[in-house]
Amino acid sequence: NCQLNEPKDIRVPLKAYFTKPSGLGQLLILIELTEKARAEFRNEHWNDRPTISIWLQCTRLAVDVFSSSDPDGTLTTWVTDLMTGAPINQATVSISNQKKETDQQGLCTIKRYRPGNIQKTEEEEDTKNEILIVEKGDDLCIQVNIHSYRSTDDVYIWHIFNDRGLYRPKEEVHIKGYVRLMKIKGEAKIPTYAQGIIDYIIYGSHSEQLQQSKVELNNYGAFD
């Protein structure tokens, strides 16, 4: 039994729904209020909550996708075994109307776009909803919202962390970070130490502003 405004963990066995002998597959799980709950909270906000959907993949394929900044939008996919990290050879990688197989290193390169001198339609320019599918035997891994970000502009890359995830009231918080300037030169991406002064704002768990100030990066592009 669930209590109002109290979280509760419920274990739902799903093994029986994976019908392949390997136990691999895809499930779409829908979570919604029961009729009893709807009747009990019909005057509460819970009654208007939409159905929660969860897409679950059970796969042994680990898929990493890397996009280049060249005009044709070259896409490199690296497929490895999720358990051992070993590269997977001859896995089929497909996106849009392109399909290729991985090599012995588990790598596959696909040119996703027409050459730059051919005019693209509005639909072809919008690649945010493209789906990449990797298949090996009866195993299948799907990556959604594949988007090849092509830019010749230099960009800053940030890695920020604190000393722990949870603090007691009035405890001191330490925040550190590293900033790199990624310079784009053709197909090469060259990271360099960022220099200068940065502005920062720190917010609490309830989006309240805790501090606003400036800090100067050291010779290694780091701050504390």
Image (spheres, rainbow, N blue to C red):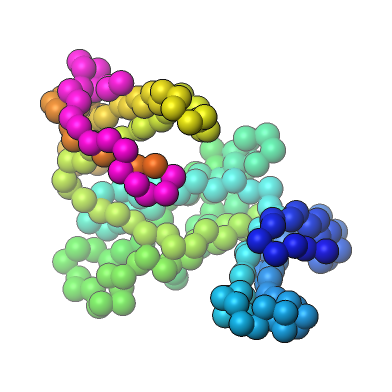
Q: Residue furthest left?
A: 196
Q: Is residue 206 magenta?
A: yes
Q: Nearer the viewer, residue 129 or 215?
A: 215
Is residue 24 shown left or right of residue 108? right
Residue 170 seen in the current view: yes
Compared to 27, does 10 lie above or below? above
Start-end of magenta stretch? 205-224
Q: Say which residue appears at 61% left-offset and 82% top-offset.
A: 43
- Relative placement, left or right, of 101 versus 54 is left
Residue 89 is situated, as x and y percent measured from the top left of the image, at 60, 45
Quarter holding residue 182: top left
Residues 163 and 29: in front is 163
Taking the spot 39% from the left edge, 42% from the top edge, the residue there is 204
Q: How many numbered marks, from 0 up?
A: 0
Q: Nearer the viewer, residue 183 or 172?
A: 172
The quarter of the picture where the C terminus appears is: top left
Q: Is residue 129 magenta?
A: no
Can you give x and y, in whole percent of width and height, for residue 18 in the image?
80, 63
Q: Name the residue located 65 percent from the left edge and 41 percent from the top edge.
A: 81
Q: Is residue 137 visible?
A: no
Q: Say which quadrant the N terminus sits in.
A: bottom right
Residue 181, compared with residue 80, is above or below; it is above
Left or right relative to 114: residue 20 = right
Query: Residue at image x 57%, y 60%?
Result: 142
* Pick the front one: 215 or 152: 215
50 in relation to 24, above or below: below
Left or right position of 143 against 130: right
Residue farthest along the top direction in this orientation: 219
